[in-house]
Amino acid sequence: MSTLTWTAVCAFDDLLPERGACALVDGRQIAVFRDFDGAVYAIGNLDPFSGANVLSRGIVGTRMGEPTVASPMHKEVFSLVTGICFDDPEVVVPTYPVQVRDGRVEIAA
């Protein structure tokens, strides 16, 4: 059984609702998002369509009740829950376990 290694990336209060931030965890760029209800999500920051690390700068929204981010490059929309692209479901960005503990956002990568 493997155990997750959690890395603290920022204070929860440092994340603005409906905005993204980029964190470097174990050599990986990870886009971190907080919604208005306080839920936190972590996905890979690399936009697979453009090859640029920009998803943390994307537009946060929802589709069919699911939290999403639209790439700032070509506007493809990704689920913050599953990483699946709504515009091309065969394209998926990685998702990462995320938790808030003692006011700190932690990611396992």
Image (tube, helix red, strand yellow):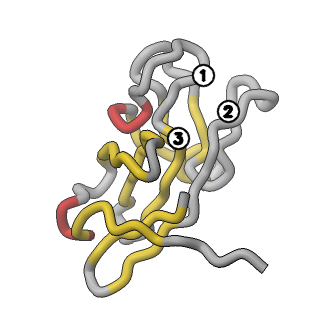
Write the residue at 59% across / 37% down: 78
Mark 2 near mark 1, Cβ–Cβ under 8 Å?
A: yes
Residue 44 shows which numbered tag?
A: 3
Residue 21 picture location, percent across and down: 30, 46
User: Residue 2 or 22: which is nearer the viewer?
Assistant: 2
The C terminus: image quadrant? bottom right
Q: Name the residue under label 1.
A: 48
Write the residue at 52% across / 16% down: 51
**Helix, strand or loop under label 2:** loop
**Helix, strand or loop under label 3:** strand
Q: Which badge, 2 or 1, is on the more N-terminal residue?
A: 1
Q: Residue 73 sits in which quadrant? A: top left
User: Residue 60 or 32: which is nearer the viewer?
Assistant: 32
Residue 59 picture location, percent across and down: 39, 34
Q: Mark 2 points at which residue?
A: 85
Q: Residue 17 sits in which quadrant? A: bottom left
Residue 25 picture location, percent across and down: 42, 52
Nearer to us of marks 2 and 3 is 3
The number of numbered badges drawn on the structure is 3
Distance of label 2 from label 3 (alpha carbons): 12 Å
Nearer to us of marks 2 and 1 is 1
Write the residue at 72% across / 75% down: 2
